[in-house]
Image (cartoon, helix red, strand yellow):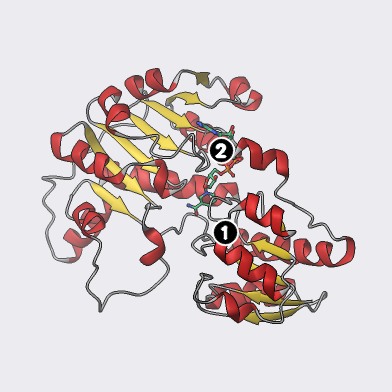
Amino acid sequence: MRVAVFSTKPHDRRFLDVANEQVRLELIYLEPRLSEETAALATGAGTVCVFVNDDVNRKVIAQLRDLGVRFLALRSAGFNHVDLAAAEAAGIAVGRVPAYSPHAVAEHTVALMLTLNRKTHRAYNRVREGNFALDGLLGFDLNGKTVGIVGTGLIGEIVARIMTGFGCRVVAYDPAPNPRCVEQGVQYLPIGDLLAQSDVVTLHCPLTPATHHLIDDNALSTLKRGAMLINTSRGAVIDTRAVIRGLKNGTLGSLGLDVYEEEADLFFEDLSNRIIPDDVFSRLLTFPNVLITGHQAFFTEEALRAIAQTTIDNISGFEREGQPLHPVRSEVMRQGG
Ligand code: NAD
């Protein structure tokens, strides 16, 4: 089967080529993101393979259906960028990579917490310039602090384990509590109590209608004053304008982001010689207590190997049996996560 692979970067090609050695699918590597403007590049392909910032909306689905595409292979766990109802109606099956390396994302989350708290990013630059002053580098002990985890699935569970190891009290909010977290001693609380009690809040829920702008002005008004907020889930779980207000008035002590609600026009590209037109993002960059990485939490050798292997397995499974190994099921669609 011919597979049109959108948003291809050199690392995608490297890992997909290795995973494809035995199966030998015809992979057509395309650098553009999938959108209404680029969907025609899938002409002749039975499968389209996409990443997190490809826009698989209703119109794109209709275009793909007209081109004869029958399978959409997501190189991601999240599927908020796909109109699943439209895909189902168009007879296009959708497969995803439900778990590649939750450790990769959990460990990057903790890297953001530690960097923001101990300001190692600022210390690195200072020391290189011969500035050994400590002013502005004061942090706090994580030991004994309360960490609130919103969403205790694969990634949230690992974050809970790591933070328990730091000596933190770990509390969580999840409509479906994870029994392994309960066994570890994680205490489930209503979201308002979690926000009020936590020194660090970290988001690990999917982006759904229920979690869209979960952290808004109202949520920030219940947050413990000066708390740290970390988001490695999806950008739109946070109302960015509200957190900017929170940073300005001191409600929010610090902010670590790996995702941003308007990231599709920025992330994964080298824009260092361009003017960034997004004033909200640019404002975020001006705060000394904000740390942003460009959606790299997943970016480890182990995760890329697993993403490539599961993607190839999904496509060859669909080719053989008309079903990917890991379908995005209709019951999941109804729950939205
Ligand atoms: P998962 O499906 O294993 O866990 C998600 C958890 O969120 C589940 O326990 C679910 O019950 C819970 N949840 C659902 N709705 C909720 C709500 N309204 N409030 C609180 N919790 C809710 O997913 P995962 O593998 O742990 O991944 C979590 C998210 O991380 C993904 O949805 C994805 O958006 C994001 N992610 C980011 C990166 C990255 O590179 N930054 C990589 C992978 C995944």
Residue 313: which quarter of the image? bottom right
Image vertical order of residue 301 relative to residue 258, above or below: below
Q: Is residue 113 left or right of residue 34?
A: left
Looking at numbered disc 1 in the image, what kind of residue is underneath it?
A: Arg
Q: Position of residue 4 (x, y in %)?
A: 65, 76
- Tag of residue 58: 1
> Looking at this rendering, what residue extends furthest in the right direction?
321
Q: Nearer the viewer, residue 81 or 192?
A: 81
Q: Nearer the viewer, mark 2 or mark 1?
A: 1
Quadrant location, the C terminus:
top right
Q: Give the quarter the ligand 1 occupies.
A: top right
**Mark 1 element type:** helix
Which of marks 1 and 2 precedes in the sequence? 1
Distance of mark 2 from mark 1, alpha carbons?
35 Å
Image vertical order of residue 201 relative to residue 127, above or below: above
- Tag of residue 158: 2
Residue 100 in view of the camera: no
Callout 2 touching callout 1 (CB < 8 Å): no
